[in-house]
Image: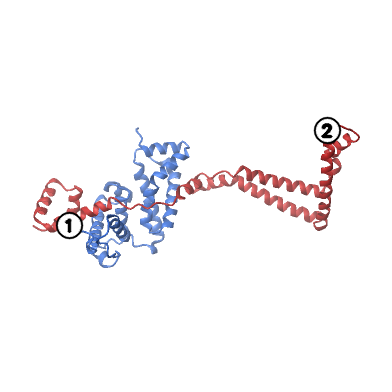
Chain colours: A red, B blue
């Protein structure tokens, strides 16, 4: 009897031969050492393949997918910092080019406490002293800026800087939604 | 309908539970990554493709039919993704449609890298050796060996995933085993 084919040997090992074919294969292998050896070799191969060496993916794999699927909101602190920077910038610009010092609340307070005594008047006097000093420094700085940046140029520079800050803020706020929309589209 | 573990996680994900999807990814990441890395033979590309796969799974999760096994559905998506990638970068990999090639041709043409000196090595090293040989066999055989042994799928499931007839799947897996056996015999790894 001719030796068994590799297909028959593999199928025999897997138990997928019909009962008659399986009996024939077993009978043949009792007499044929070559086929017995080949069947054993396929069994050994099957045992090795059945326990594959799995590759461990890098730890960043899942977190990166999660970040792509659910982009985290920009940090509250960074949003607050950007809003504060924009506001401060705008106020500074207004202060430099429009002098509102005459309508200052501090000056009004100073007038009401002039000649008065007591701890509240003392506190207000201290605050107004600090304020007056700061105002003098700011005025000097504003005068210096006005020399280097006359109003039209200053307005353009301030406007561009303010727009840039606003764009940064909008980007930080809208990025998660934009990314989500892109994800849905893809 | 009784849901299995995967399907329960999908239900939770569809209800908005992000952690459930993360759990699902953790469950499959190793097997999927192993399959992809052995298919594309490049770890960086495999990372990108595995991430793209999970990303895609998430975006089409609402189309999943609960009457079918999640793993078969997912592996089919993964298989198509990888095959698409390989087709687009075909120059870098071996032929996908070389149907005429026989196991003897493959061995003689040097498709299989010979590794010597493993005769007296430990079981783990023998296993590494066999899987290295698997990595070198042509894609049409390799993909089926990977689906069968890494993903632990039945012939029928492999046929469904690859859109091949069950007979072809069996035949190719038999041929792949022939190639592997011959290689192991040549190197004195068997008997």
In the picture provided, is B103 more to the left or to the right than A78?
A: left
In the rendered image, residues at marks 1 and 2 fall on the same chain: yes
Q: Which mark is residue A38?
A: 1
Residue A51 at least partly seen? yes
**Residue at the bottom extreme?**
B109
**How many angstroms separate mark 1 from mark 2 (CA)?**
104 Å
- Using the rendered view, name the quadrant where residue A122 is placed: top right
Question: Disc 2 designates what residue?
Answer: A120
Question: In what element is the residue under mark 2?
Answer: helix
Q: Position of residue A136 (x, y in %)?
A: 84, 48
Q: Position of residue B20 (x, y in %)?
A: 44, 39
Split into 4 quadrants, where in the image is the C terminus of chain B? Answer: bottom left
Q: Which mark is residue B176?
A: none
Is residue A186 placed above or below A33 in the rendered structure?
above
Question: In what element is the residue under mark 1?
Answer: helix
Split into 4 quadrants, where in the image is the N terminus of chain B? Answer: top left
- Using the rendered view, name the quadrant where residue B97 is placed: bottom left
Tell me the subunit letter for badge 2.
A
Q: Residues within 10 Å of mark 1 (few under 14, many from 20)?
A: many
Looking at the rendered image, the disc whose residue lies closer to the viewer, 1 or 2, is 2
Q: Which badge, 1 or 2, is on the more N-terminal residue? A: 1
Tell me the subunit letter for badge 1.
A
Q: Nearer the viewer, residue B100 or A33?
A: A33
In the picture provided, is A63 more to the left or to the right than B93?
A: right
Residue B170 at least partly seen? no
Residue at x 40%, y 55% (from the top left corner): B84
**Residue at the right extreme?**
A115
Count every numbered label the image shows and give the total: 2
Q: Position of residue B35 (x, y in %)?
A: 36, 52
Q: Position of residue A103 (x, y in %)?
A: 85, 40
């Amino acid at each position: 009897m001719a030796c068994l084919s590799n297909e028959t040997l593999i199928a025999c090992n897997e138990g997928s031969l019909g009962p008659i074919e399986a009996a024939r294969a077993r009978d043949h292998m009792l007499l044929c050492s070559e086929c017995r050896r080949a069947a054993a070799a396929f069994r050994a191969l099957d045992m090795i393949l059945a326990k594959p060496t799995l590759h461990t993916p890098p730890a960043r794999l899942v977190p990166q997918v999660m970040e792509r699927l659910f982009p985290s909101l920009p940090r509250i602190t960074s949003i607050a910092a950007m809003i504060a920077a924009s506001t401060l910038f705008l106020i500074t610009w207004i202060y430099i080019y429009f002098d509102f010092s005459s309508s200052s609340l501090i000056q009004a307070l100073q007038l009401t406490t002039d000649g008065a005594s007591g701890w509240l008047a003392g506190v207000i006097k201290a605050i107004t002293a600090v304020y007056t000093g700061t105002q003098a420094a700011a005025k000097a700085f504003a005068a210096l800026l006005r020399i280097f940046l006359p109003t039209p140029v200053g307005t353009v520079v301030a406007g561009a800087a303010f727009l840039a800050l606003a764009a940064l803020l909008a980007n930080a706020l809208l990025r998660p939604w934009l990314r989500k929309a892109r994800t849905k589209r893809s | 309908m009784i849901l299995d573990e995967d399907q329960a996680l999908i239900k939770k994900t569809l209800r908005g539970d992000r952690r459930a999807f993360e759990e699902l990814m953790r469950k499959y990441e190793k097997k999927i990554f192993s399959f992809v890395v052995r298919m594309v033979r490049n770890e960086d590309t495999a990372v990108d493709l595995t991430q793209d796969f999970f990303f895609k799974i998430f975006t089409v999760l609402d189309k999943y039919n609960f009457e079918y096994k999640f793993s078969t559905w997912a592996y089919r998506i993964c298989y198509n993704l990888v095959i698409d990638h390989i087709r687009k970068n075909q120059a870098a990999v071996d032929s996908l449609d070389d149907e005429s090639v026989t196991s003897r041709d493959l061995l003689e043409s040097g498709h299989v890298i010979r590794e010597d000196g493993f005769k007296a090595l430990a079981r783990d090293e023998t296993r590494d050796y066999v899987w290295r040989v698997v990595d070198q066999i042509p894609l049409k055989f390799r993909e089926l060996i990977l689906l069968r042994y890494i993903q632990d799928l039945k012939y029928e499931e492999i046929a469904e995933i690859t859109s091949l007839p069950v007979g072809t799947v069996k035949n190719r897996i038999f041929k792949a085993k022939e190639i592997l056996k011959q290689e192991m015999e040549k190197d004195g790894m068997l008997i």
